[in-house]
Image (tube, rainbow, N blue to C red):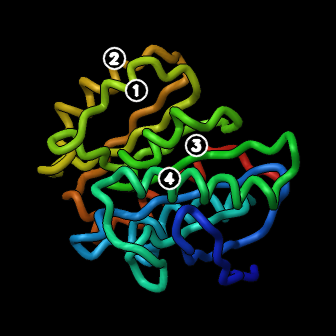
Amino acid sequence: MSIERVSFHSDQSLEGLLRPQSQKAGVVICHPHPLYGGNMYNNVVSAIEDGYAAQGFSTLIFNFRGVGSSQGEYDEGEGEVRDATAAYKYLAQHLGDDARVTLAGYSFGAWVISRSALEIDQFDSLFLVSFPCLIYKWEHLKNFKKEIIIVGGTYDDIAPMDDLYDLYQHLPTKDKHLKVINTTHFYAGKETELIDFIKETIPKTR
């Protein structure tokens, strides 16, 4: 399973890793907060990628502006939303016209990709791990009609389960799933459980 180091352009040049597999399905994955050590090598990002790759998806992880070799600097979420949209467009170029595309993210990355989803029509589902409800608003998700999968940790103090339950209950779509993992916000030692959940929930593609 080859992994290609790639670059693409938002309003900054960004670095990423593309794992090309199926042209029928792909996932772009956003990492946690850049100012707190978040990057594309994060353990949760890697677990999401491994889970979807096991199901045959092409995967794209990348560094937001100002992280690693990506140009620019942190932009309080606004520029990062543009980065996520650019990552989606880059991945879409490598997939077929009728491909299933999942937009995924962890923590800050979950909030960013959920906002990018407002600007992207051609995608299939959202996969959000520990959406940081205590820090960022989620009202924009109340009108979300596509499939959405939410994962939370029992002891997560940044994405408390009570808030995630509230978010989940307000989602209008019937195609929604909520997975609770016995962990803190950081999923240390729980990566395999997250991978297994993806493998159990997401159909394989060719």
Residue located at (66% from left, 64% from top): 59
- Whichever of callouts 3 and 1 sits on the residue coming sooner in the sequence is 1
- Whichever of callouts 1 and 4 sits on the residue coming sooner in the sequence is 4
Residue 190: image x %, image y %? Answer: 34, 64
Measure how far apart labels 4 and 3 are at the Cα level.
Answer: 29 Å
Can you tell which quarter of the image residue 75 is in?
Answer: bottom left
Residue 26: image x %, image y %? Answer: 70, 54
Q: Residue furthest front?
A: 11
Residue at disc 2, secondary structure: helix
The residue pinned by badge 4 equals: 82
Residue located at (19% from left, 58% from top): 184
Residue located at (56% from left, 77% from top): 15
The residue pinned by badge 3 equals: 201
Which quadrant: the N terminus? Answer: bottom right
- Whichever of callouts 3 and 2 sits on the residue coming sooner in the sequence is 2
Q: Amino acid at mark 1?
A: Leu
Please state which of the two labelled residues, at mark 1 or mark 4, is closer to the viewer. 4
- Contact check, label 2 and label 1, Cβ < 8 Å: yes
The residue pinned by badge 2 equals: 170
- Whichever of callouts 4 and 3 sits on the residue coming sooner in the sequence is 4
Residue at disc 4, secondary structure: helix
Please state which of the two labelled residues, at mark 3 or mark 2, is closer to the viewer. 2
- Whichever of callouts 4 and 2 sits on the residue coming sooner in the sequence is 4
The residue pinned by badge 1 equals: 141
Question: Crowding at label 1, few (<14), some or many (≥20) Cα neighbours within 10 Å?
Answer: some
Question: Crowding at label 4, few (<14), some or many (≥20) Cα neighbours within 10 Å?
Answer: many
Measure how far apart labels 2 and 1 are at the Cα level.
Answer: 8 Å
Please state which of the two labelled residues, at mark 4 or mark 2, is closer to the viewer. 4
Which quadrant: the C terminus? Answer: bottom right
